[in-house]
Image (tube, rainbow, N blue to C red):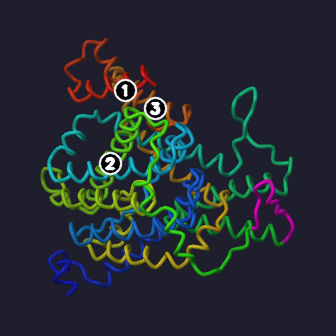
Amino acid sequence: MLNRIFKLKANNTNAKTEITAGITTFMTMAYILAVNPSILSDAGMDPTAVLLATCLASFIGTACMAFMANLPFALSAGMGLNAFLAYTVVIGFGYSWQVALLAVFIEGIIFIILSLTKVREAIFNAIPLSLKHAVSVGIGLFIAFIGLQNAGLTVDNSSTLVSIVSFRDQFSTSGISALLAVIGTFLTGILYIRKVKGSILIGILGTWLLGILCQLTGIYTVDAANGYYSLLPSFAVTDFSKLGETFGQCFRVDFTGVGIFNFIVIIFSFLFVDLFDTLGTLIGVATKADMLDKDGKLPKIRPALLADAIATSAGAVLGTSTTTTFVESSAGVAAGGKTGLTALTTAILFLLSMFFAPVFTAIPAFATAPALIVVGFLMFSNIAELKLTEDNYTATIPAYLCIIAMPLFYSISEGISIGVISYVLFNLACGKAKKVNPIMYILTVLFILKYIFL
């Protein structure tokens, strides 16, 4: 049956290899089950509800990828997109998380429509390659900055805006938490460099375990009044009723104080980031798996994009940020995964993870911070694709502005808009208007209008 559904023999693979690859993929991306509730809870969402929604959305999206495209790619709540929802849309713009989820739902519907046509590929081709790489780099810096904040390593400073924490002051709470995050970052980095499977997840759990040992020995002191809770895990039964706190909430929106133009900008910001993240991941992982044809295209890209779009809308209804294809799928591909059976294995493991919700939601912020910092590095590594030569400054200076704007303005959408506007203006001023795709002019006008009227 498995051979008939997933064409195992035709792809020169077997069930054992595919299942092993699926387990490998899950181990490398399971960190999202700890990180996503941590990030979205900052937006006021219940962490248990977010975890359950993440598990279900991951299962739905990855199962769709398995059966619709027969590809070994797994999906879950995208890093960067969850940060955009929590820290830009909710905390930055001041909108409710219900409004943000509705934007994600609509984005998914638009993606479904675009995925059934060639429009999605056309939009992708309109954006210059330099800005595509810059978005990934900028999000990497933004995520790392959030990780430093969650670890308590970056603190407010009245003179310089930010500075490093004083480890000696309140060492038993903030000091030891920050120090454990530093140790966890080194641990995660070393494991990743040594190609240990599941290195990011092991880093999270290892940092948490060190914290528990510090609490048991009195080095870490519980101070719930100031946000330093007990690090000991709770092995309670998962409260599945919590899902009701987010399920369908995207349709119960109070639009008071939300302008229609603002809402459209949010939708297209989600759309822009998810567009390049998904296509880039699909092409990158497919290249590693040698799945591209002689023209460098992925033959099954349309059903793959459709599965991604369905997962996004389903995730929004359940109560999580944009669900997208994970680059960690390459770990399963490296382990021999070639078909949808790899994806189905990963999907089932995400579903089973729902029963361990109390454990994942008990992981402290300083333990998930190393994962954010290391994942930020992995996204930042795309900076190597930017060729800084004098003949392409009209492309690389806008890319640079896009990158620095995201962490310094604490907004992914600001980085994207500044990158697009500056790219068009630099090329117009330097006599290179023919290089600019007409779609870029439309985006520039829209982004400028945003700054004028907001």
Which element carries disc 1, helix, strand or loop?
helix
Q: Residue 211: x and y, percent? A: 74, 66
Question: Residue sitting at 46 percent across and 34 percent down?
Answer: 403
Taking the image as shown, residue 319 lies to the left or right of residue 111, namely: right
Q: Residues within 10 Å of mark 3 (few under 14, many from 20)?
A: some
Asked if residue 214 is among those painted magenta in the image, a careful observer would answer: no
Q: CA distance from mark 2 to mark 3?
A: 18 Å
Circle 1 residue: 447
Q: Residue 245: x and y, percent? A: 52, 64
Q: CA distance from mark 1 to mark 3?
A: 9 Å
Q: Residue 227: x and y, percent? A: 75, 56
Taking the image as shown, residue 57 lies to the left or right of residue 306, namely: right
| Residue 120 quadrant | top left
Asked if residue 229 is among those painted magenta in the image, a careful observer would answer: yes
Q: Residues within 10 Å of mark 2 (few under 14, many from 20)?
A: many
**187 vs 164, nearest the viewer:** 164
| Residue 321 quadrant | bottom left
Indicate the quadrant containing the N terminus: top left, top right, bottom left or bottom right. bottom left
Q: Which residues are magenta?
A: 217-230
Under mark 1, the amino acid is Phe
> Does residue 151 appear in the picture of this structure?
yes
Circle 3 residue: 414
Prevailing secondary structure of the magenta residues? loop
Which residue is outermost to the bottom? 1
Label pair 2/3, CB-CB below 8 angstroms: no
> Does residue 220 appear in the picture of this structure?
no
Under mark 2, the amino acid is Glu
Q: Residues within 10 Å of mark 1 (few under 14, many from 20)?
A: some
Considering only order in the chain, which callout, 3 or 2, is on the residue closer to the N terminus?
Answer: 2
Circle 2 residue: 107
